[in-house]
Amino acid sequence: MADRRAYPSDLSDARWELIEPVLSAWRSERRGRALDFGRPPEHDLREIMNAILYVDRTGVQWRYLPHDFPHWNTVYGYFAKWQSDGIFAQLNGLLRELVRQQEGRNTKPSACVIDAQSVKTSTSVPATSQGTDNAKKIVGRKRSIATDTLGLLLAVLVTAAGVQDSVAGTQLLGQVAAAHPDLRKVWVDGGYRKHFVEHAATLGIDMEVTTRTPGTRGFIPIPKRWAVERIYGRLMLHRRLVRDYEAHPHRSEAVIHLAMSDLMARRLTGEATISWRDPTSMDQKHMPG
């Protein structure tokens, strides 16, 4: 890491150790294809990832990256390449398997939970990729995610907010089933309709709807669905996700993969996610090493 004061979002040595092999393999593979042949690497991959995590965690615009990081245009270039090459999804899959091992689970999940969240978009998001969620009165995009029963991300799909949950969920379930052939059970809420049930059946997956007990008031965790609802709350610790700022939906999906990878890496290394609620968060002794 460069000789600078650490930011709370910086990778610790332990977390960098978890993800460094993936990024180094990516660089080696690109050099092997002669994309960078003859030139030594100009940028430290750890510093690039630190800069991307800074944007993800703080919500700052790319152009507003602090000057002690590499130039914002370089950082965004790496972010775009890693997204298109599937690096963020790869990191998410690697860390998910490690967390499941740590929890004594089989690395391959047999059940999942699907839910959707509609969020507002920024002015930089093209109108063609937005829509209106009439039920929630939100103009923007919809994030549909599938998690395992521990709340670990299996897949994410970002669409216009007007896309019905069951339509997005059908596509998402197909992705999850293709990547996880052992999947046999899925829990959803009442917004997932008949054709989603039929699609699940054709995949050999049993679908179960979980709902609130009639007559209950206030906040009541719903069995099974609580895992996915809780992870939406934890993802909101990353301010880049409070709204959808990305011009392209696939970049939005990458930011979600990145945030989830950050949460899992901290879980594996026993590091808390520093937030504004922590009065000691700016104390240097609590900074990542």
Image (cartoon, rainbow, N blue to C red):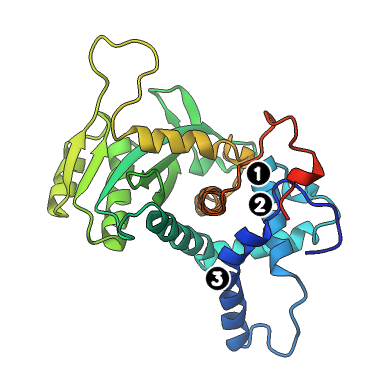
Which numbered disc, 2 or 3, marks the residue that appears first in the sequence? Answer: 3
> Hey, which quadrant is residue 221 in on the image?
top left
Q: Residues within 10 Å of mark 3 (few under 14, many from 20)?
A: some
> Which residue is drawn at the image coordinates 56% and 54% (left, top)?
269
Mark 2: give few (<14), some (14-19) or many (20+) Cα within 10 Å. many
Q: In 3D space, how far apart are the residues under numbered discs 1 and 3 (Cα atoms)? A: 21 Å
- Which residue corresponds to mark 1? 57
Task: List the residue tagged with mark 2.
Answer: 53
Whether residue 152 sits left or right of residue 40 in the image: it is left
The amino acid sitting under disc 1 is Arg
Q: Are marks 2 and 1 in contact (CB under 8 Å)?
A: yes
Does residue 82 sit above or below 277 in this rendering? Answer: below
| Residue 254: image location, x then y, percent | 53, 54
Badge number at residue 22: 3
Element marked by disc 3: helix
Q: Secondary structure at mark 1?
A: helix
Q: Nearer the viewer, residue 217 or 142?
A: 217
Q: Is residue 3 left or right of residue 260?
A: right
Mark 1–mark 3 CB contact (< 8 Å): no
Residue at the image position 52 percent from the left and 54 percent from the top: 268
Q: Position of residue 273 (x, y in %)?
A: 61, 42
Kind of residue sitting beneath label 2: Leu
Return the x and y of residue 113 as percentages of the image width and height.
31, 42
3D distance between C-alphas at marks 2 and 3? 16 Å
Marked residue nearer the N-terminal end (1 or 3): 3
Residue found 37% across the figure and 37% down from its top: 227
- Say what amino acid the circle numbered 3 marks: Val
State whether residue 51 is above or below residue 210. below
